Amino acid sequence: MCEDGVPVTVEFGGGTELLLAPPHAKVHTLTVRGHAGRAPDMRALVHHIRTHLLHEREELFVENDAVRAGILVLINDSDWELEGEMDYVLQPKDHIVFISTLHGG
C-alpha cells in the first residue's frame, strides 16, 4: 500500500452525480487513505465520498455507513458483490462506478 493513499477513479451516473457539489462532475480522480493502519477499502472510499464530495441529501447515497440499496456499484466493470463489497481493498488505478437504479416518476 502506498503511504500517501491509493489513487482511484470514481464515476457517478444515473443521477448520483446530482448529489455532488456543483458542477456535478461525473468522473473524479481521488486518493483514498486507509484508517487505523489498514489498507484503504470500499469503506474508506465511501467515507471519503461522504466527507469530501457529497453536497446534499447524503441519505440518498449512504445508509448506515454503506452504499444505499438501489445504487449499483461496479469495481473495474465487475459487480462489487463478486469482489467482496465493502471489504474490497482498493488497488491503484481501480475504476469504481456508482449508478442509481432508482428513478422518480
Image (tube, rainbow, N blue to C red):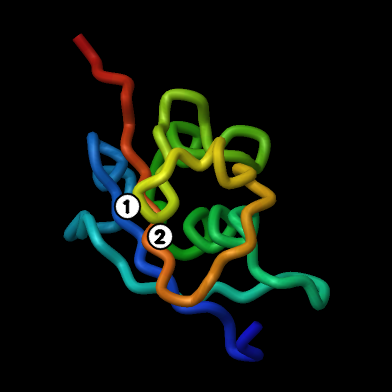
Residue assigned mark 1: 20
Eyeballing the image, is 45 above or below 77?
A: below
Residue reaching furthest to the right: 36
Q: Local crowd at mark 1 within 10 Å, few (<14), some, or many (≥20)?
A: many
Q: Residue at x 23, y 35 (%)?
A: 14
- Whole-percent x and y of residue 16? 31, 41
- The quarter of the picture where residue 10 lies is bottom left
Q: Residue at x 44, y 51 (%)?
A: 75
Eyeballing the image, is 66 above or below 39?
A: above
Q: Identify the amino acid type marked 1.
A: Leu
- The quadrant of the rendering that contains the N terminus is bottom right
- Whole-percent x and y of residue 20? 32, 52
Q: Residue at x 29, y 49 (%)?
A: 12
Disc 2 versus disc 1: distance between alpha carbons?
6 Å
Tell whether label 1 touches label 2 (CB within 8 Å): yes
In front: 7, or 55?
7
In front: 27, or 20?
27
- The quadrant of the rendering that contains the C terminus is top left
Eyeballing the image, is 48 above or below 59?
A: below
Residue 57 located left or right of residue 36? left
Q: Identify the amino acid type marked 2.
A: Leu
- Whole-percent x and y of residue 38? 77, 71
Q: Is disc 2 placed on a helix, strand or loop? A: loop
Q: Local crowd at mark 2 within 10 Å, few (<14), some, or many (≥20)?
A: some
Q: Residue at x 30, y 67 (%)?
A: 28
Residue 55 located left or right of residue 1? left
Residue 84 located left or right of residue 70? right
- The quarter of the picture where residue 22 lies is bottom left
In front: 11, or 51?
11
Residue assigned mark 2: 53
Q: Is disc 1 placed on a helix, strand or loop? A: loop
Residue 93 located left or right of residue 18? right
